[in-house]
Image (cartoon, rainbow, N blue to C red):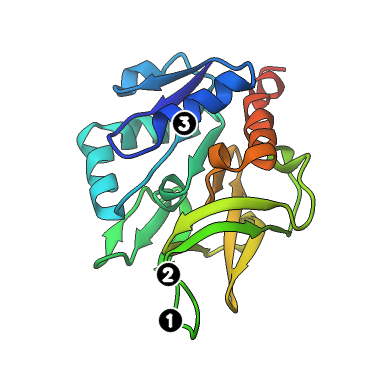
Amino acid sequence: MIGIIDYGMGNLRSVQKAFEHLGHQAEVCSHPHELNDKQLVILPGVGAFRDAISELKRKEFDKAIQDLIAEDKPLLGICLGMQLLFDRSFEDGEHDGLGIVPGTVERFLPEAGLKIPHMGWNGLQIKSANELTANLAEGDHVYFVHSYFVRPADPSVITTTTTHGTQEFVSIIQKGQVYATQFHPEKSQRVGLNLLNNFANLSAQTCT
């Protein structure tokens, strides 16, 4: 069973429907204790970093996420959910994140002709392979909506990058059993569904 964290900021139903379309059970979890029996967990997110981290802590999902990682359960962060995994964000000030992946969250630099937010379809450049990207091909397009991106302190966590204007940013990461995408796989049609299916199948691999 897949647990989708509900802290008031995310496309919960869209993510849930994507997994159901793939034949996987997914449950929206509004309380940390509901994650206890889940083999896999999704941390979605849409909106402002400051509000999101505040709600995660208020509902004590921050502690639950740390417990999941200690138990080596697979976790997938999506969009803002990816950014929340990092040490700090510089969105509207400076705000501490969950500190699971060392690094920062930064805004795209102004550039002639560059639209911010970065919105729409863009390609992936593969830097390393893992279970999440098993069916991914160089240049596959996925759907983005964001003005900020992550800058990992350790380059080894980078799975794919994407270029917006002249600026290359990280679009998928992996650190142990923690995975995250800057794009929305639930909105990325075939490529995104393949990625979500790969994540759902991690439960079988981790139980063997």
Viewer-closest of 158 and 137:
137
Residue occupying image coordinates x 73% and y 52%: 140
Is label 1 in contact with label 3 (beta carbons under 8 Å)? no
Q: Quadrant of residue 134?
A: top right
* Quadrant that contains the C terminus: top right
Residue occupying image coordinates x 56% and y 19%: 20
- Amino acid type of the residue that numbered disc 3 sits on in the rendered structure: Ser
Cα separation, mark 1 vs mark 2, equals: 8 Å
With 55 as the anchor, is 170 left or right in this view? right
Residue 144: give x, y in percent of width and height.
52, 54
- Amino acid type of the residue that numbered disc 1 sits on in the rendered structure: Pro
Label located before the other in sequence (2 or 3): 3
Label located before the other in sequence (1 or 3): 3
Label located before the other in sequence (1 or 2): 1
Dot 3: element: helix
- Amino acid type of the residue that numbered disc 2 sits on in the rendered structure: Ile
Look at mark 2 in the image and give the residue it sits on. Answer: 116
Residue 114: give x, y in percent of width and height.
49, 77
Look at mark 3 in the image and give the residue it sits on. Answer: 14
